[in-house]
Amino acid sequence: MRNFINFFIEKIDKIIFLGLLIISFSLVLNRNFFQNSKFNFFSNNIISLIKNQTKEIDNYLNLRSENIKLKRENLNLKIQLNSVTKNSTAAYKSGNYNFNTAEIIANSIKYSRNYIMINKGSNDSVKLDDGLVTKNGIIGIINKVSPKYATAISILNTDLKINAKIKRTNHFGSLEWNGEDHKSMTLYDIPKSANIKINDSVVSGGMSFIFQENIPIGKVKNIKLKEDSNYYLINVELFEDLSSLNSVYIISNYNKNELYNLNIDNEID
């Protein structure tokens, strides 16, 4: 208390000056319309500027929650889209799939066998052989699961084969990566009788327990006929750039285990 009193005594002249200045300033504003209007205009501008800056900061801090909200809305739209089908078979297949969202925490593209790690695991009902997709295409297949995390074999893995087809002609083949360009893959086993054209869309074939039919993958970039063969080598440009992934959808087939047990398919694709 003594220190406060000493400080007050030492600064009494400045305190009195400041008080008189405030009183004078108040009298000038209250008794002069011009100065009062100028002060109000200036103060309102300052307040508006502060409010705008505060709003911008608040919007920036809320970007993450808004992003999560948009992903959920996009996921709901995707589920609704997959439930709208042209025939009973497609409707049956769509009804057997569940979708979830995840963030990518690790991703490689420079090796011959690349993998992806996500921030969802068995606690979030992620299972082995669940599929990973984005709005632009197929990304990989879950191969290891822990309670909080999971890893997936990337489509940029020379050991992985994806059942795919030319959407326009409905010709099926096997999509594989040759270990070189991360933006393209090769589609095999399409017969030369197929009327394939450059820029034809390549989608998932549906002959799989993992991915639904007609999930986008890429487009035909180049067509070659294998020597002494009746089948094309088709270079497919991927819709998704796997070097810049942030988030994915997890696809789970409810009936996957039952189908595997029946040994209908001898190859996981």
Image (cartoon, rainbow, N blue to C red):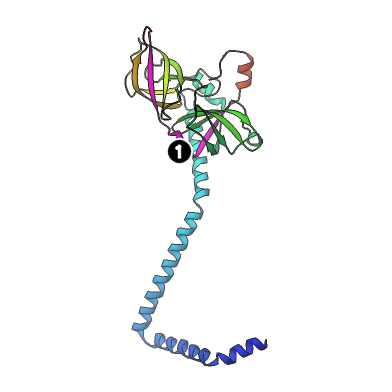
The quadrant of the image that shows the N terminus is bottom right
Q: What residue appears at the point 40 percent right and 85 percent down from the top-left corner?
A: 29
Q: Is residue 246 magenta?
A: yes
Q: Answer above or below: position of 107 versus 24.
A: above
Q: Is residue 101 magenta?
A: no
* Quarter holding residue 36: bottom left
Rendering coords of residue 126 (x, y %): 61, 32
Give the SS element for disc 1. helix
Does residue 144 appear to the left or right of 164 in the view shown?
right
The residue lying toward the viewer, choosing from 142 and 215, is 142
Q: Which residues are magenta?
A: 228-251
Rendering coords of residue 100 (x, y %): 56, 35
Residue that protrudes farthest toward the top in the picture: 228
Q: Answer above or below: position of 196 versus 144.
A: above
Q: What residue appears at the point 49 percent right and 43 percent down from the top-left corner?
A: 70
The residue lying toward the viewer, choosing from 124 and 106, is 106
Rendering coords of residue 209 (x, y %): 56, 20
Query: Which residue was labeled with disc 1?
Result: 244
Q: What residue appears at the point 35 percent right and 10 percent down from the top-left corner?
A: 192
Tell me which amino acid carries mark 1.
Ser
Q: Which class describes the residues within 10 Å of circle 1: few (<14), some (14-19), or many (20+)?
A: few
Does residue 142 appear to the left or right of 231 in the view shown?
right
Q: Answer above or below: position of 229 versus 84.
A: above
Rendering coords of residue 251 (x, y %): 55, 29
The residue lying toward the viewer, choosing from 113 and 49, is 113
